[in-house]
Amino acid sequence: MDRDSDVKKEIIIDSYISEDNIDREQAETLNRYVLILKYFPLVVILIIILFLFIMFFIMKSPISMYILLAIFIILLIREISTLLFVYRMRKNIIRPLESLQRGVDEVTGGNYGYTIDGEGNTSLAPLITSFNQMSCQLKDVQDTNEKYELNRKKLLAGISHDLKTPITSILGYIEGINEGVANSPEKMNMYMDIIYKNARYTNTLIDDLFLFSKLDINQMKYQLQQINVKDYFDDIFIEKKIDFEEKGNKVEYFSSVDADMEMCIDPKMVYRVVSNLISNAIKYNDKEQVVLECRLEKISGKNGIKVTVKDNGMGIEEKEINHIFDVFYRVDKARNKDIGGSGLGLAISKQLVEAHDGSISASSVLGEWTEFSFTIYDQKSKM
């Protein structure tokens, strides 16, 4: 991560110090100033020599006082011109360069985001503007890296917590078996059942973590296919409807898309998103009968769809609704593995939806219902 960050910062710096960022007219003005400064001492020496030569002949003339006065006026005008020239040089070149030097020192010292203000319409104004843009972009890179680092630490903490519990449980029950604590067939079956559930939970967590990692670093290879939207989602929701209603629950499904509507998507990944939302609605429901309302709608004016899953469950508190798509975030503070799930489901769903150029959101009324909605768009251009 640090190496990629340094490379990105070097690219930003190189792009902003290139000659293309200095206006041609400003460059010509700067060259003129440099040329004047180069020959200025020679011109002064020649003027002094000429002045002494003229003075030698003037002293013999009867009108010497008038000539001396004229020379004095000329010299006064020259000195005033020189002062004006130096002032303009100080204002347009030297002072901006000093400010740029301070800015470079600040950025070199790690103070990304440092900007130079108050230079006005100086000859180096375009260069100063480019420097400010470069500094701000370096600050953005730094902030992004800090965010990634924080997310990495949270991810490691979540992995450690969620893996330690089942593994500790597995080791404990295996130790009990080895020590003869499970001294009856019933107790042995109970121990083996607990070991199996913890092992399955651990395997699910590892699989989800592997998938999330691939999505997070954009290494996921999607299998895009052209599908009939209505047929595809009808199959999913009718399958879920039959399965859940056999258990005494109720699923209502409404579709308003055209029968011939087609889209290019990854069917397996979209199915994972829908299944995750429906599974959550079942797992986090405190009602005797779970009632799901599922909707499929076409997005007006675009080749995209909106899918909505609404349940009659316990709801989610308003302060938590904005965090439920975070990695390892679960509403149950005890992170109870008996409920099921790895804590990565919604984070993975968010990544999959965004890979289809869509978005996912949630709304809820505590104790009454929770509604998840996501949009996806045709990915034909990516095939």
Image (spheres, grey):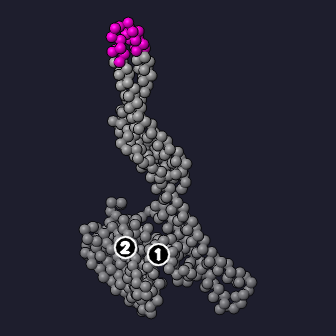
Give the x, y percent position of residue 80: 38, 28
**Closer to the camera in the image, 74 or 169:** 74
Q: Closer to the N terminus: mark 1 or mark 2?
A: 1
Residue 160 lies left or right of residue 13; in this view the side is: right
Residue sitting at 58 percent across and 67 percent down? 156
The CA distance from mark 1 to mark 2 is 14 Å
The relative height of residue 272 versus residue 32 in the rendered view (above or below) is below
Q: Is residue 314 in sight in this rendering?
A: yes
Magenta span: chief secondary structure: helix
Residue sitting at 56 percent across and 78 percent down? 201
Q: Which residues are magenta?
A: 49-69
**Closer to the camera in the image, 100 or 194:** 100
Give the x, y percent position of residue 44: 42, 20
> Three-letter amino acid code at disc 1?
Ile
Q: Depth-wise, is mark 1 or mark 2 nearer the camera?
A: 1
Give the x, y percent position of residue 186: 65, 92
Q: Is residue 19 in sight in this rendering?
A: no
Quadrant containing the N terminus is bottom right
The relative height of residue 371 versus residue 269 in the rendered view (above or below) is below
Any magenta on residue 56?
yes
The relative height of residue 49 versus residue 330 in the rendered view (above or below) is above
Looking at this view, name the residue that lies furthest to the right: 179
Q: Which residue is mark 1?
A: 324
Any magenta on residue 52?
yes
Residue sitting at 59 percent across and 80 percent down? 198
Residue 366 lies left or right of residue 228; in this view the side is: right
Tag 1: Cα neighbours inside 10 Å, few (<14), some, or many (≥20)? some
> Three-letter amino acid code at disc 2?
Phe
Q: Which residue is mark 2?
A: 374
The relative height of residue 153 versus residue 256 in the rendered view (above or below) is above
